[in-house]
Amino acid sequence: MSIDIETARRVAHLARIRVEEADLPALAGELSGILTFMEQLNEVNVDGVEPMTSVTPMRLKRRADVVTDGNMQDKILSNAPDAREGFFAVPKVVE
Amino acid sequence: MSDLNKLTIAGARDALRKGETTAVDLTMACLTAIDAGDALNAFVHKTPEIALEQARAADARLKAGDAPAMCGVPLGIKDLFCTKGVPSQAASGILEGFRPEYESTVTTKLFEAGAVMLGKLNMDEFAMGSSNETSVYGNAVNPWKVDDRQLTPGGSSGGSAAAVAADLCLAATGTDTGGSIRQPAAFTGIVGIKPTYGRVSRWGVVAFASSLDQAGPMTKTVRDAAIMLQAMAGEDPKDSTSAAVPVPDFEAALTGDIRGKTIGIPREYRMDGMPAEIEALWQKGAEMLKDAGAKIVDISLPHTKYALPAYYVIAPAEASSNLARYDGVRYGHRAKLEAGDGITEMYEKSRAEGFGHEVQRRVMIGTYVLSAGFYDAYYNRARKVRALIKRDFDEVFAQGVDCILTPATPSAAFGLGEMADADPVQMYLNDVFTVTVNLAGLPGISVPAGLDAKGLPLGLQLIGRPWEEGDLLNHAHVLEQAAGFVSKPSKWW
């Protein structure tokens, strides 16, 4: 599977990583190389095999659906690049 | 006592309990060694004030006779662990300035046991790398040196490995997603164990690939690994994947007796182009275990060849999802925006500026293999192959194999920068012997077993049954004693 420039641009956008136009051909080449390496997996017969979802055969634990934590607005905002009046601030998202 | 920083954990524990030294003296010796070791670029955030405060508290506990084994032991902590109020940025620019408001479960447990934190250790960015060359802090350097070249300490726990090998600390925490504890341990002549998945809580450890990540100790001896793992392990209500399995006394498991045990030698690990020295060391390791009374059997793990490509689908897929949280909103780096830039530009610019090249590449690969139309062809297929890899191990254990012996790495440490022009897949090959263990969720340990012709350390890996770290450590202990590896790097830094 070879990745073309258009696909590289789309993947970068899906990943929300800005890639300059001039860097797209090199990126497409790198991604293609890695995908070619992965294509060895097509040699394996996986008929009837369930995809592995958990390393240990255990059921994911559950807990009571109750509030166990909270009231720490200051701590939650303390590392924000832009926090105002108790909120995370971001560029305008609604018109 | 002189050279306190060169002590093992066991040695320090005994000396502290006998009153032959103090935690403060031990800590001071390490802090001095750290300041003299800047050329190794292992410690990237030093925390001497915290260390001395913890050391004084440890001395008080020792005096009161309330001293667990780790009490007063100075450690380095990999930058991947969140430590309250102390920079914890996973060696990434995107977490520049991040100071967690909370403490990871592993460091909490270590501190409750009285351990001392000397500072945070260098690593590959988000633990993605095998040479510590993707770090925002720059390369960590291997204390081992045989010519003009500076060598990699391996990765991703390169800073941890360099710091322990150079006696800047008594031991360090590491994390291992595809070999990130065992490969650097082998490259620096120390011991590193990746426990069974679920043995150690992942809470507060910056996530890379959640179904593969496990934390573990990096130490000077197998005994130290047993002591430190004991303090790190256990069920944690904050990590739903941590297992409700009792933690046995790992040090007590080191009986030195492996008579009647069965050691498997997997034929698929005999790779084309493997250096003869590594092949010979592997043979020698098998003979040592045989001389100790174990039975050596040839085994087959037929899907070994597909472990790396499966890993390089699954790990980036999980990473692309885990790293979606770095969006410039809640913490970390936010790009300067231009007039008219909206939220999408903020995400795209912040992530382009904050993530390094390898991380960007893996996030994009992960995004691709999870995207509509490719999910089945790549991600689901890789997860099916993963099930087959695990089945291979289940079958050999069911045949009565207790431990599996393999080389830890396909080569000794290579020069920093030597892989710069290689294609990314070449670097991924470093994990060829270790990555199967993560995919199957098994415990694996790297033990220094000899030197190559140039004088660089080589390691052997032992792989154990799930939850049998005690038995695994005992085998490693026997191998360590038989190999008698005592070499240390000569100090040039």
Image: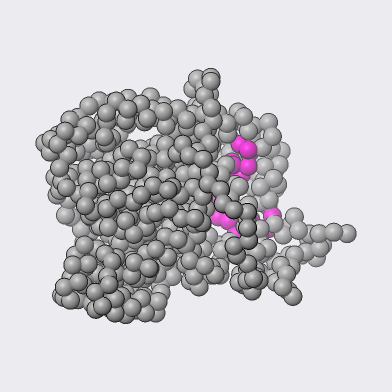
Q: Does residue B108 appear in the picture of this structure?
A: yes
Q: Position of residue B264 (x, y in %)?
A: 26, 30
Where is residue B93, by image quadrant? bottom right
* Nearest to the observer: residue A67 or residue B366: A67
Q: Give the residue drawn at x 38%, y 24%.
A: B302
The answer to whether residue A73 is left or right of residue B221 is right
Q: Position of residue B324 (x, y in %)?
A: 63, 52
Q: Which residues are magenta?
A: B348-370
Q: Position of residue B124 (x, y in %)?
A: 45, 55
Q: Please, is residue B391 above or below residue B195 in the view?
A: above
The magenta stretch spans residue B355: yes
**Magenta residues: mostly which secondary structure?**
helix
* Nearest to the observer: residue B105 or residue B371: B105
The answer to whether residue B290 is left or right of residue A63 is left
The answer to whether residue A5 is left or right of residue B5 is right
Q: Give the residue drawn at x 63%, y 58%.
A: A66
